[in-house]
Image (spheres, rainbow, N blue to C red):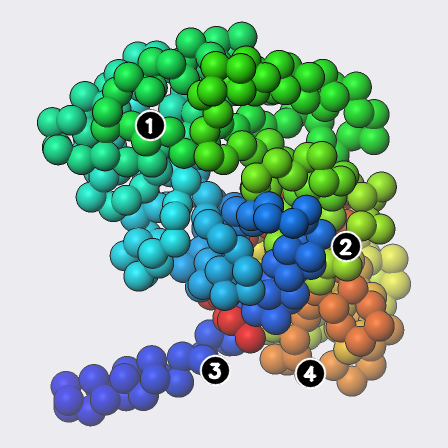
Amino acid sequence: MVVSRERERRAYSYALGELIRQRAWVEIDSSALAHNARQFKALLKPGAGLMAVVKADAYGHGAVRVAPILLEAGADSLAVATLGEGIELREAGITAPILLLGGINNPAEIRALAPWRLEPTLVSREQILQVAQTLAEQGETLPVHLKVDTGMSRLGIPWQETLATVRLIRELAPLQLQSVYSHLATADDPDPTVMNQQRRRFQEALTQLGQASLLPPVIHFANSAAALQGPHWHYDLVRVGLGLYGLYPAPHLQRRVNLRPALAVKAKITQLKTLPPGAGVSYGHQFVSDRRMKIAVVGIGYADGVPRGLSNRLQVLIRGQKVRQIGAITMDQLMLDVTHLPDLQVEEVVTLIGQDGAQSVGAEDWAQTLGTISWEILCGFKHRLPRILI
Ligand SMILES: Cc1ncc(COP(=O)(O)O)c(C=O)c1O
């Protein structure tokens, strides 16, 4: 009895590929990822490297599976935000250089850097001394990266202190200064004023380093938006996230490369029903039918990453046609008006993000409706949605 139950369970888990498509899932198009990486490689000035930003589980795409594809397609190194994200990639067998973009101050975290060969971002004098001391105690050396704040007012030393800080790092034997970098606050804004001011500050810091013969091997500044604005932003490498996933950081930057979105979100119809006129739909009856309607219940909700704020404002695709979502989006389910699709069946696939026939819906469409950015939409898809690499 027990044995046959176990066998039955195993049969299901072996069939996981199919089972995973039971309710709702995310599809990741590996050829789109590789294509996007090649597009950026081709755009870069000769000799400049491509650092693939795979933090936040590769913007929701699944870092462990995405990173090898991007490396294979030409990315030279990786960047993550946290120690845990770096360790996850190392445990998956990834040996490429990994930069930790986030601030690391905690002694336990600092001790973990060298064994995992994770390269920290240095952001303050105190932290620099702490990292150097820990590495010295461990008898280790490690490539490190100095972050300079040129106007983002986030992590980093003030740009005016670059030279003094590099001098300090050079005195600390365990620290191998690999790069000096900065991050742009407004690279996706068509108005370049702030971006250019940051650039002038960065250049001034670099000039001082050059005069003191203290330039590190690598300088970097650009995210996706800056990388798309010409070779003077490329320095020795660019740190690209969003663009590798196939989205443009801003409409005015669309002409520079041809990108393909890599992520699609799909779910299945779990029930179809006919409503009489005057029937309220979902919590709060935010939608009430004004005629006899056919609706579909779909197995995906805000606990999967479909924001509740899209309720009554979302469009999805079925059989290549646009379908409107109605009523409040609930934790695990949402409803669609499918009155115009006569012979729909339970189990049919609904595309929430992605292409279906000639139609497509993008993360940027959701972002626009919600007044947010596509980065946030991509990072919002929860682990409850299995990622299927195709
Ligand atoms: C320091 C840093 N560099 C590069 C990136 C990549 O930015 P994008 O996704 O716009 O290419 C990020 C992402 O937020 C970042 O924080």
Which of the pair 251/218 is nearer the observer? 218
Residue at 84% x, 51% y is 255
Amino acid type for the residue under numbered disc 4: Gln
Q: In this rendering, is residue 124 above or below 114?
A: above
Disc 4 versus disc 1: nearer the observer: 1
- Residue at which label 2 appears: 257
Helix, strand or loop at mark 2: loop
Task: Please tell me whether mark 4 sits on a helix, a strand or a loop.
Answer: loop
Q: Tell me the SS state at disc 3.
A: helix
Question: Where, by quadrant of the figure, is residue 150 drawn?
Answer: top right
Q: Which mark is residue 345?
A: 4
Label 2 crowd (10 A; few <14 / some 14-19 / many >=20): some
Q: Nearer the viewer, mark 4 or mark 2?
A: 2
Q: Amino acid at mark 3?
A: Glu
The residue sitting at 53% across, 15% down in the picture is 211
Residue at x 48% of width, y 25% of height: 215
> Which one is in front in this view, the residue at disc 4 or the one at disc 3?
3
Residue 175 rendering spot, x and y as whole percentages: 29, 28
- The residue carrying pointer 1 sits among few (fewer than 14), some (14 to 19) or many (20 or more) residues within 10 Å by Cα, namely many
Q: Kindly identify which residue carries mark 3.
A: 18
Disc 2 to disc 3, C-alpha distance: 35 Å
Residue 315 appears left or right of 103: right
Residue 61 pos. (x, y %): 52, 57
Label placed on residue 104: 1
